[in-house]
Amino acid sequence: RKTKYIIIQDQERADIFATEHRISRSRFILVPNSPLENEPEEKTGFWNRKFKLKADVKIALHAGSLGEWTGLNDLVKHMHMWPVNWVLVIHTRYDTDKSSILSNRLTALQNDFEGKKIFFSTTPMDNMSFDNAIKDSDACLAFYIPDGKTRYTGVNLKSVGLSSGKV
């Protein structure tokens, strides 16, 4: 509260920050933040090899949490509307073998999604492998659906969902 200026990415974050910390909005300086545009890199066939997919298959990647706030259930419910050559890869950064909670959630997801064009990647990757996983995806999906059920899935989740450069 003693700082003269606060540098932040956009007005929406400034409003949340100001309200949360009771700080005057006049002290904020907005500086947009996003990665520079990169030249497209050549695909390595990472997902095609891992799941034995044909070369013409298009891959939509959902990486990160398996939580309900990610919109996975709604996403899968509408997959019947996807073009026939698209599949969904769900990658979690957590080792589901080491967590009974994650393992149970994964089992429930797999049962719900049975018969759909969905592939699960449940082993954490090093940075190089994850870079290849991203490069080899035709679309990356990141949804943040605040539900207010916990302190992390309300305003906090909405703020996280505004993160520049997430995908």
Image (cartoon, helix red, strand yellow):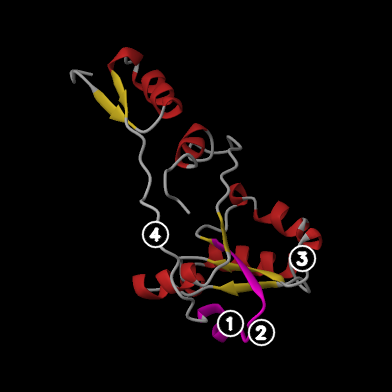
Q: What residue is disc 3 on?
A: 83
Q: Which of disc 2 and disc 4 is earlier in sequence?
A: 4
Q: What residue is disc 2 on?
A: 54
Question: Which quadrant of the figure contains the N terminus?
Answer: top left
Pinpoint residue 97: horizontal percent, then vertical percent: 50, 75
- Which is more foreground, mark 4 or mark 1? 4
Q: What residue is disc 4 on?
A: 38
Residue type for callout 1: Asn
Q: Which of disc 1 and disc 4 is earlier in sequence?
A: 4
Residue type for callout 4: Asn
Local secondary structure at mark 2: loop
Residue 147, relative to residue 2: is it above or below? below
Residue 13 appears left or right of 92: left
The answer to whether residue 24 is seen in the rendering is no
Residue 99, relative to residue 32: is it above or below? below
Q: Are marks 2 and 1 in contact (CB under 8 Å)?
A: yes
Local secondary structure at mark 1: helix
Residue type for callout 2: Lys
Q: Which of disc 3 and disc 2 is earlier in sequence?
A: 2
Q: Which of disc 1 and disc 3 is earlier in sequence?
A: 1
Local secondary structure at mark 3: loop
- Which is more foreground, mark 4 or mark 2? 4
Residue under the image location 77 percent in, 65 percent down: 83
Between the C-alphas of marks 4 and 2, the distance is: 27 Å
Crowd tier of the residue under label 3, counting other residues whose Cα lies within 10 Å: few below 14, some 14–19, many 20 or above: few
Q: What residue is disc 1 on?
A: 48
Residue interval drawn in magenta: 46-62
